[in-house]
Image (cartoon, rainbow, N blue to C red):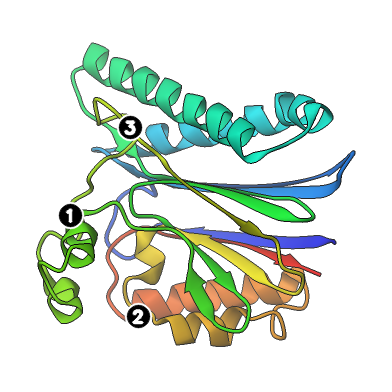
Amino acid sequence: MEFIASMSSDIGTTRKTNQDSVTIKIANTGIGKVAMIVVCDGMGGLAKGELASATVISAFSDWFYNDLPNLIAAGINDNAIRSQWDCIVKNQNEKIMAYGKANGFSLGTTVTAMLLTQTRYYLLNVGDSRAYEIYDSTVQLTEDQTVVAQELKYGRITYEQSLTDPRGSVLLQCVGASQIVMPDMFYGETKPNAVYLLCSDGFRHVISNDEIYQCFNSNICTDEGVMKNNADYMIDVVKQRNEKDNITVGLIRTY
């Protein structure tokens, strides 16, 4: 199985800085090609959120280059990925929180990270950035860690109410601003001729799953150029619909 990838990030229409961060890594390994994509949505005044998101991106990049080869050699499995990624998130939470306290301000970031091997994907999530699998339809793979998503899950509000609930952006936890961080982990089969999309919440607030499918299904996303053009086009659509947040999307297509 091969991977092609593209990513785009935009400051949006009203923010003074882009506090989102994104990276995609692809490497040849002893178990075939693997790909990793990480999206972080930082929060904090001025460049503080950008610092938080970039710090977490750097930690996952270091893991990809330094720890993943050893993990593959030893035999990659669900528990090993969960353990190592859980350590990354908790270490970064302590590091970012200590930095904020030392400098008299608060900062934090969401993180959604996905590793794709030839047979299996591994997916971590903290906050409300998202991962989708686009195959026969658009399927959300992560669960938003927000007050509204929790209220909806337990039936305390309806889906229609969730769309206008003023607590829509209130996170249950994030890296750097929560005393304890408990990442969600998800696992599944890596499908051929599928597109895996990770995004910050600014990308998906005002577009539908059907629009995501029409723009990013594997029949459309045939090369990196098309993927990049479609991502940039959809970011422009989101901005025209008055999305005020930073907007970031990363894409990996399998074939």
Query: Which quarter of the rendered picture does the N terminus lie within?
Result: bottom right
Q: Residues within 10 Å of mark 2 (few under 14, many from 20)?
A: few
Disc 3 is placed on an element classified as loop
Horizontal and vertical percent for residue 67?
70, 25
The secondary structure type at the circle numbered 2 is: helix
Q: Does the image show residue 161?
A: yes
- 81 horizontally vs 174: left or right: right
Quadrant housing the C terminus: bottom right
| Residue 208, image x, y percentages | 39, 82
Mark 3 → mark 1, Cα distance in angstroms: 16 Å
Left or right for 132, reference 254: left
Q: Is residue 58 visible?
A: no
How far separated are the C-alphas under marks 2 and 1?
27 Å
Residue nearer the viewer, 27 or 179: 179
Please provide percent x and percent y for residue 24.
Answer: 65, 49
* 234 lies above or below 120: below
Left or right of 108, for residue 155: left
Q: Which residue is mark 3?
A: 181
Q: Quadrant of residue 105?
A: top left
State the image quarter where residue 152 is shown.
bottom left
User: Residue at label 2?
Assistant: 240
Disc nearer the start of the sequence (2/1): 1
Q: Quadrant of residue 173?
A: top left
Q: Residue at x 30, y 60 (%)?
A: 245
Amino acid at circle 1? Val
Q: Which residue is mark 1?
A: 147
Looking at the rendered structure, the kind of residue marked 3 is Val
**Residue at screen point 39% across, 70% down:** 204
Residue 97: give x, y in percent of width and height. 29, 21
Q: CA distance from mark 2 to mark 3?
A: 35 Å
Residue at screen point 36% across, 26% down: 93
